[in-house]
Amino acid sequence: MRRSIVSRVLVIALAAAAAVSIAPAALHAQDETADEADSVDPHWRATTVYFLMTDRFANGDPANDQMVGRKRDGGPLRSFEGGDLKGLIRRIEQGWFNDLGVDAIWTTPVIENVHGFVDEGEWGLTYAYHGYWPKDWTAVDPNLGTEADFAAMVKAAHGKGLRVIIDVIANHAGPETPLDPRWPETWVRRQPPCDYQSYAGTVDCELSFTLQDMRTDSETPVALPDFLVAKWRKEGRLKRELAELDSFFARTAYPRAPKYYLVKWLTDWVRDYGIDGFRVDTAKHVDPELWGLLKREAAIALADWRALNPERLAGDRPFYMVGEVFNHGLLANGHSVGAAYDYGDRIVDFRDYGFDGTINMGFPGHLQMPLPALYRAFDAELATGAFAGRATLNYLASHDDMGPHDPSREKHFEAAEALMLAPGGAQIYYGDEIARSLVVPGTKGDATLRSVFDWQEVETEAGIAMLRHWQKLGKFRARHPAIGAGRHHELGFRPYTFARTLDEAGIADRVVVAMTAGSEGPVTIRTGTVFAEGAMLRDAYSGEVVRVSGGAVQIAKPDRIVLLEAAP
């Protein structure tokens, strides 16, 4: 890894709950989940993560918009568009993420990607704007900024109480292009193509003919690629990089096989900058043993960084790792599918290999269920079912799911509520908060999901209304880990009302939520025994303060939703 000029960078279920009232004993019993020793930190289970494509979010330095020979000659939305780390820093410092109640920022990979393009036929020329075509795992991509910019971004985020999660890739290197050579045969496999019919047909195979699939199954020592040695020499850091590799392999006694180089390079981002977690790309296409090794080394690296950085982010949490296991979610057709992934001839539980959880790839489809049934099912899975004690992330849309929920954003107020109040973690995809359309005329394939954040939309009446809605939901969620990590209790259905309660790891939290869209005049909201008789509550959405009487409260002027919490 590079270091700063002055010094080494170290900143670097399905059973229905009680429908009217809950006795205190029942509340306590329902808060019992999986053995706490086996559970992921409840803060991570309730986290709100903001996922952004770094190149599409905010442009802070137009001087780096076209670097290393890249041009704006790609197909629609298939060139670099100018977003960078300086633009992200500016939005962090302005409080954009804090105002949304975000706990962590997840960026697409910031590592240096291939410089050239791939001709994708009718899609046009495509550059590595997305970050998933690695060339050098030890450097920041020049279109995104410098290593100093990355260090400043992490420092700015931590200064705002935000954790940083970076996207990591071990399955493949980027494609060969006119500007980028092929990796040696000792590093990458050419055949066979993946057929997804078995473990070997999903893991020990070439995922895409345009990519270069890493031999992550190999234990055979290999030499560094000549092109990488030459690159480091030209950049004046060859001696340092080689010395670091010597130190790593001497400490670990791992053979110099491709996967161990990758582990070293990936965990350097933790050791040098103090990042808080990994989102793992293409998790099911890599030998799971590699991921377990990556998590162990990342935890060691974070401990090393924290020992040298007493000014680190307060409220330390364990290193977090969440994986993309494509086409795998909490439910299928409303029923549990189990936490492990079935390759057909092998079943892998990624929790056994370092993962705190996985992304709930099915959430857009799950939203076809009635909300009460969905929340009941999620509560059962996350509290006592296959996913008990695990972290997960629900989402409305992402950069590569071609089946997003409500792509034209016709019912986005309701979608925001469904996501932000669902049991489990929440993943906001950049632009969700202003209803960025996922239907972009003229684009091909996944480019339609990846438009540039329109900061002018934030100033419109519609944009302001949507943003305020997300901010209220997000801040309420941030104050109350019970929403994501607590137990779900139904209290009534006219309007639909539920409680979330959490009593775990020293956290005692409870809230009541009522879906009051369309209600007029005073509305009675049942609170059962969630709050004591006479307790003063505040509706975090409208600001109205009320008193519990007879296990209920009267909301004089309900908005589209009521978010009840203990009044300060």
Image: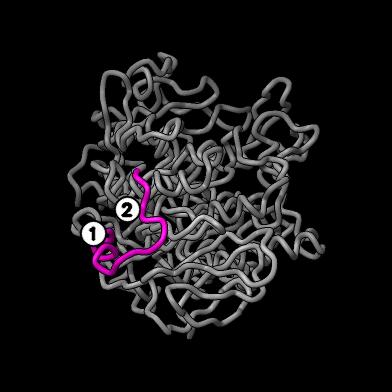
Residue 564 x %, y % = 50, 72
Front residue (pair 81, 277): 277
The stretch in magenta equals 15-31
Q: Is residue 389 left or right of residue 554?
A: left
Q: Is residue 5 visible?
A: no
Q: Secondary structure at mark 2?
A: helix
For the N terminus, the image quarter is bottom left
Q: Secondary structure at mark 1?
A: loop
Reading the chain from its start, which is encountered first: label 2 or label 1?
Answer: 1
Say above or below: 446 vs 352: above
Residue at the spot x=82%, y=62% of the render? 460
* Residue occupied by mark 1: 32
Give the mark count. Answer: 2
Mark 2 vs mark 1: give the one in front: 1
Residue 203 x %, y % = 35, 25
Say above or below: 485 vs 547: above
Residue 466 x %, y % = 70, 60
* Residue occupied by mark 2: 244
Amino acid type for the residue under numbered disc 1: Glu
Front residue (pair 140, 553): 553
